[in-house]
């Protein structure tokens, strides 16, 4: 079965790799990272590796823990994408909507809004 991409593959790899400023767990140069930030970085890295290996439950746990520590909105995208891969549509929809509220200027807004519409339609069709 072909895996559908929510974003162009280059952008997805940037988001999942943490290279995007919106997902980076970097601190200002003059501000040393806190223990929570260091832990969030490690959790994010482990979750990213799990996602790449198709271990979505483990990835979800790591992304969620990293978000709980850092509260960086971009991690919500990773959580939503992972939930989407797990076909947990109601949860994915809620997290993508939260991401759009918390990061309204995200450059991939149109793609996420499209996926939100698809998720809503699928949920409504199953409920009918």
Image: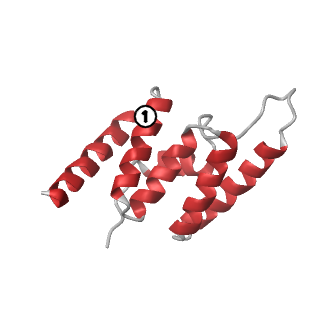
Q: Is residue 3 above or below residue 120?
A: below
Quadrant of res 86: bottom left
Label 1: element kind: helix
Q: Is residue 70 above or below residue 125?
A: above
Quadrant location of the N terminus in the rendered image: bottom left
Residue 91 percent location from the top left of the image: 40, 53
Q: Residue at x 63, y 43 (%)?
A: 19
Quadrant of res 69: top right
Q: Is residue 24 left or right of residue 96?
A: right
Residue 106 percent location from the top left of the image: 47, 31
Q: Is residue 69 left or right of residue 83?
A: right
Q: Residues within 10 Å of mark 1 (few under 14, many from 20)?
A: some
- Front-lying residue, 118 or 95: 95
Q: Is residue 25 above or below residue 86?
A: above
| Residue sticking out furthest to the front | 127
| Residue sticking out furthest to the bottom | 1
- Front-lying residue, 57 or 46: 57
| Residue sticking out furthest to the left | 128
Q: Is residue 112 left or right of residue 25?
A: left
Q: Which residue is label 1 attached to? A: 100
Task: Answer yes or no: is residue 106 visible.
Answer: no
Q: Residue at x 59, y 53 (%)?
A: 64
Quadrant location of the C terminus in the rendered image: bottom left
Residue 66 percent location from the top left of the image: 66, 50
Task: Answer yes or no: is residue 94 visible.
Answer: yes
Q: Residue at x 70, y 56 (%)?
A: 43
- Front-lying residue, 86 or 109: 86
Residue 25 percent location from the top left of the image: 70, 41
- Front-lying residue, 67 or 18: 67
């Amino acid at each position: 079965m072909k895996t559908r991409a929510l974003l162009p593959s280059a952008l997805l790899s940037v988001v999942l790799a943490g290279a995007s400023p919106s997902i980076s767990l970097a601190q200002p140069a003059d501000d040393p990272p806190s223990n929570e930030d260091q832990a969030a970085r490690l959790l994010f890295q482990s979750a990213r590796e799990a996602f790449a290996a198709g271990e979505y439950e483990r990835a979800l746990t790591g992304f969620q823990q990293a978000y709980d520590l850092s509260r960086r909105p971009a991690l919500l995208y990773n959580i939503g994408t992972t939930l989407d891969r797990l076909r947990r549509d109601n949860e994915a929809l809620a997290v993508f909507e939260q991401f759009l509220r918390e990061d309204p200027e995200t450059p991939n807004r149109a793609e996420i809004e499209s996926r939100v519409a698809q998720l809503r339609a699928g949920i409504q069709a199953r409920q009918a």
